[in-house]
């Protein structure tokens, strides 16, 4: 789901990425919003969504969620998928529609994400995570455009991490 939200909203999007991302997103919506009780067909749809979403980002790019998630993985060892979910839960500003739909998915499926994962981190930790995140320039450019450095800096990133 998050791969699709980032690729479909990015500046690197192209017809090939869009086609795969839109189909993957539709499958994610079926599984996480429309399915009632879980059944094997949900697994198959989710497998195809994962595959198509991967194709979508392979020919475009991810964005803000992944850039910030990598800092969590690097310093705290949080696994990729969980880190992405934790980050998306805190960055409504960058993907407002995806954020709102994600909140519906969490609620419908009774999913509780970890909270306060950065609560006990110090300035040096935030500096390390910010350095990791800022090093992923193509992700920021895809999400925010060529002038992304006008909007994103270590202080902005630290503030987001502190909320996480």
Image (tube, helix red, strand yellow):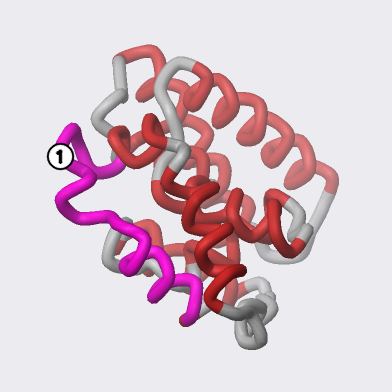
From the top left corner, tell me how far across and down residue 26 is, in percent: 48, 41
As drawn, the residue found furthest toward the right would be: 40
* Point 42% across, 46% down: residue: 134
Crowding around mark 1 (Cα neighbors within 10 Å: few <14, some 14 to 19, many 20+) is few
Residue sitting at 51 percent across and 63 percent down?
127
Residue 33 drawn above or below residue 31:
below
Magenta span: helix, strand or loop, mainly? helix
Residue 46 falls within the magenta-colored stretch: no
- x and y percent of residue 58 in the render? 52, 19
Q: Is residue 36 above or below residue 143?
A: below
Q: Is residue 72 left or right of residue 151?
A: right
Q: What element carries label 1?
A: loop
For residue 13, side relative to residue 28 (left or right): left
Most foreground residue, 141 or 113: 141
State which region is magenta.
143-162
Task: Say if residue 144 shows up in the picture.
Answer: yes
Q: Residue furthest front?
A: 124
Q: Which residue is drawn at 68% across and 38% down?
A: 45
Does the image show residue 34?
A: no
Q: Nearer the viewer, residue 58 or 105?
A: 58
Give the camera-side residue of 70 and 9.
70
Q: Position of residue 161 (x, y in %)?
A: 49, 72
Q: Residue 6 is drawn in which quadrant? A: top left
Residue 112 higher or lower than 7, as above or below: below
What is the x, y in percent for residue 2? 51, 48
Location of residue 76 (image quadrant): bottom right
Point 27% across, 66% down: residue: 93
Residue 112 falls left or right of residue 41:
left
Residue with the mark numbered 1: 147
In reply to whether residue 144 is colored magenta, the answer given is yes
Tell me if residue 115 comes above or below residue 89 in the rendering.
below
Residue 27 placement, left or right of 7: right
């Amino acid at each position: 789901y998050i791969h699709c939200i980032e690729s479909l909203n990015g500046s690197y999007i192209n017809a090939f990425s869009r086609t795969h991302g839109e189909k993957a997103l539709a499958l994610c919506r079926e599984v996480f919003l429309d399915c009632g009780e879980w059944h094997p067909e949900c697994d198959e749809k989710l497998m195809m969504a994962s595959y198509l979403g991967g194709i979508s980002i392979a020919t475009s790019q991810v964005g803000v969620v992944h850039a910030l998630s990598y800092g969590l993985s690097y310093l705290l060892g949080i696994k990729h998928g969980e880190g992405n979910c934790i980050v998306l839960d805190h960055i409504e500003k960058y993907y407002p529609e995806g954020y709102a739909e994600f909140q519906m998915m969490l609620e419908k499926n009774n999913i509780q994400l970890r909270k306060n994962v950065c609560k006990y981190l110090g300035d040096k930790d935030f500096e390390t995570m910010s350095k990791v995140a800022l090093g992923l320039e193509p992700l920021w450019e895809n999400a925010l455009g060529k002038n992304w450095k006008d909007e994103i800096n270590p202080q902005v990133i630290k503030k987001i991490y502190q909320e996480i």
